[in-house]
Amino acid sequence: MASTQLSATRRRRATWVPYLPYLIPGVIAFVLVIGYPLVMNIYYSLFKWKGGLAPMRWYGLGNYADLMADEAFWTSFRNSISMVVAMVIVPALVGLMLAAVLFDYLGRRFGPKVASVLRATYYLPQILPVAVAGVVWNWILNAQDGAVNVILTNLGVADPPDWLGNPQLAMPSVMLVLIWVQIGYPVVIFMAALQRVDPELYEAAELDGAGWWARLRAITLPQIKPETFVVALTCTVAALKVFAPVYVLTRGGPEGTTLVPSYYSFLNFFDKSKVGYGAAIATVLTIVIIVVAGVILRFQGRAERREQEGR
Amino acid sequence: MSATTTARPAQKPASMPVTRVGARLHRGVGRWFVLALAAIFALLMLAPFVIMAMNAFKSAADYSQNGPLSLPTEIYTTGLVNFWTRTNFPVKLFNSILISGLVAVFGTLLSLVTAYAIGIGRIKGRVWIVAVFLIANMLPQEAIIYPLFTMANAVGLSNSQWSVIIIFTVIQSAFGIYLLSSVMGTFPVELLEAAALDGAGRFRILWSVVYPILRPTLGVLMVFFFIWTWNEFFIPLVMLTSNDTQTVPIALASLQGDRMMDAPTTNAGALVSLLPALVFFLIFQRTLTRGVTAGSVK
């Protein structure tokens, strides 16, 4: 009886309609916690507002116009490029090399155990709270009694640099910390990707006399493209959103040299009480992230299509 | 971009002693050189942890006399006790566990139910719905924080762990819904039809057919949600403003720059703050690496 009912329903109306109730909690939760706040944030960005009970003064697109003339705003987005270098480009390249060496070379010569222990070590910084990592590094790089400068002094350097306090050095120091934090992620993903590649491809290439580099270029890179896109997308979005490391390492200083968009909007929201302005920065950052993600997804789609046509 | 949790093909045995290639692999000095390089790199990655551990148990006098690179002359727990009492650490630990634990459970549940409608119910327009969830996952938290802050005040959840629990349940489940929808999209239809023939309703099918089969994936999701929420910084920093509601990372960061925070206290604090995550990582290492791949492989 149940079966006749089921097939009858199926013929009469769309089968997906009875599943709608299962969507409702999720939709309500998302509208309340993400959709509505997002719209409200854009609404705030059209006002001059000190927050709380202070009066909201209509300002139109004035906040956005002010942003265009704000040197700090441009600096913060220029610094985002440094963040992309430190959180995407360097970790992806080094991560790929490490993954290839671990999987292809050390794994085969010393056994998978050695490779997985090394992988776990590289991944370790990924699991600790990034704020904790920042606090530790803040002390390691401390100008007076930080570990790095004590080593330098012991080596005879008379005047070791102030790593996080010198405008020229602060950004490279922050980048170094971020590379340290980030590197384990591509290693783990790329190692999993390499396990997916058919070993016969390598064996065939090896018999044909292809060297390690040739095999990497002709087999590995094309085969692990899906994972490369995942790393590029997730890390780029994370780099554009980065907040905690900057907060605990430098607070955007010295002289704004490590200011990033998220921290700049936080400053305006809760420090300078310029809520409308902070909301405008957050809105611009949102748009930038969606556009960049869209571009990466587009590239991915094109690459997938080309691959299918190639076959 | 779709994801599956199908186990990757079992790793080929590492050595192939029968073949000539295998025999060649186990000879040569070069391999020791490469191993040494990889090990040195691993040591560099570990160095901050080592330095931290070395200085966590020093007395302040020992530190100022011998600097950060010496081993402690004696094991002092002053720094640890100092941090423990100043931050009222048990309270922070409880808050972190409460928030991360509940988010892991609620987030996984919300992901499961919503993904059921999308992946198995095949709701019309599901591609767009998933796209919206994906975008929600990528949003900078700054773009929603001020309204959320205002809303929490309005409903009496200001400075409450519950506001953070609700927010992260939704944010984390954005990823969960994306992952589970594509996993359920490949769910064997025969199983669903067999259950329907036996007279099981949609709810019964979810709990007694879909849920048991997806349990490993849900486990991975829970571990992820727990660690991600544990490590979160921005939203707890803004929403939790008093000592009795704050989480572990916020407690550590807010003590920074405090004049009373000498180096041993900082390091002891960092050490106990990362221990829970480390223990969790060691327990779930296998699940985790499987999970990282789960999201990535097409």
Image (tube, rainbow, N blue to C red):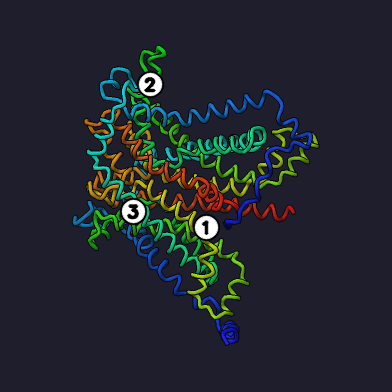
* Residue type beneath disc 2: Leu
The local secondary structure at tag 2 comes to: loop
Labelled disc at residue B217: 1
Q: Is residue A194 left or right of residue A235?
A: right
Position in image of residue B40 (x %, y %): 53, 26
According to the picture, the residue beneath numbered tag 2 turns out to be: B69
**Comes first in the chain, label 3 or label 2:** 2
The residue located at (75%, 30%) in the rendering is B24
Q: CA distance from mark 3 to mark 2?
A: 37 Å
* Residue A80 or residue A188, whichever sits in front: A188
* Residue type beneath disc 1: Thr
The residue located at (26%, 38%) in the rendering is B84
Q: Is residue B280 left or right of residue A256?
A: right
The local secondary structure at tag 1 comes to: helix
The residue located at (76%, 34%) in the rendering is B21
Position in image of residue B85 (x %, y %): 23, 39
Residue A64 visible in the current orientation: no
Instruction: Report whether mark 3 lies on the same chain as mark 2.
Output: yes
**Comes first in the chain, label 1 or label 2:** 2
According to the picture, the residue beneath numbered tag 3 turns out to be: B99
Chain identifier of the residue bearing label 3 in the image: B
Q: CA distance from mark 1 to mark 2?
A: 44 Å
